[in-house]
Image (cartoon, rainbow, N blue to C red):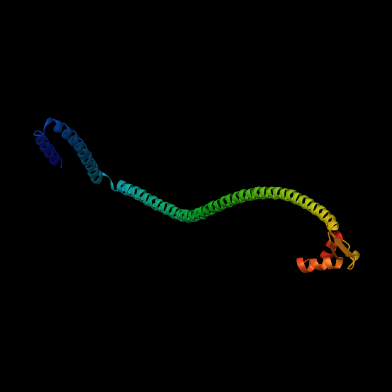
Amino acid sequence: MLDNLVSRKKEKTEGEENVPLTQGAKSKKKNGETDMRLIAVVWILIMIIIYHFHTPAHVKKAHKAKVDASLESIADGISAKRRSIASQIDNLKKSLALDKEEKVSKAHHEEEVGQLNTDLEEHKANIEEHKANIDKLETVNKELETSVKETQARIEEKGKKIAELEAARVKETQARIEEKEKQIKELQTAMDGVTADISLFCEKCPFDYGGLRTSCGARAAYLVSTHGNEEKTAKEAVIKW
């Protein structure tokens, strides 16, 4: 075995002579590390061989028992570790399931909260719209109140003018009435001046004027037959003569 190692080292040394300096330095370092590992392995193998052939039987048995106990302890430790890890995995799976369930519940809750927020925004929008409508209605109401007041003022103004016109018309009518009554009185007076009391008419009384000698009745008859006067008027005319 040592001859093989020496021959391998010699071969590597001969092979390294043809390697460039930059690469040779790296190869030597790497080969040195490899040689140290090989020497360590060989040394361990030598110690094992020496131990196997030169150690007494009872020492080997005691050592085997110690190794077996150590291996059993290691095996028990591995089993315990596996059980611990399996328990941890199981607990983590349960916790993960709870987290997933909580996540689903949280997502559902967040969805409900989101819907509630959406509904809230819609309600806010409706409230704002109603407020806007109320403001519009208040504005319209104020405009209507202003219009009613203006109309009422115009009605009152018209009423005043109508009352003034009515008073003027009544006054004017009263003036016309008084004027006409006055005219009637004047005409009545004039009528009285041209009207005679026909009860005083005498048919046979003589009517003598400018050589014309006749009776009052004949003159009245003349006016009726010739001029078409009424008999009363004709008699009044004769009386007034």
Is 20 on the left or on the right of 111, as rendered? left
- Up the image or down, 25 lies above or below 216; here it is above
Is 110 on the left or on the right of 16, as rendered? right
In which quarter of the view is residue 216 placed? bottom right
Residue at 28% x, 46% y is 56
- Up the image or down, 77 lies above or below 230; here it is above
Residue at 13% x, 41% y is 4
Q: Position of residue 156 (x, y in %)?
A: 72, 49
Judging depth in this view, the residue of 38 and 113 nearest the camera is: 113
In which quarter of the view is residue 55 placed? top left
Residue at 12% x, 30% y is 21
Farthest-out residue, top: 21
Q: Position of residue 153 (x, y in %)?
A: 69, 47
Q: Position of residue 140 (x, y in %)?
A: 61, 50
Is 142 on the left or on the right of 54, as rendered? right
Judging depth in this view, the residue of 41 and 31 nearest the camera is: 31
Judging depth in this view, the residue of 226 and 79 nearest the camera is: 226
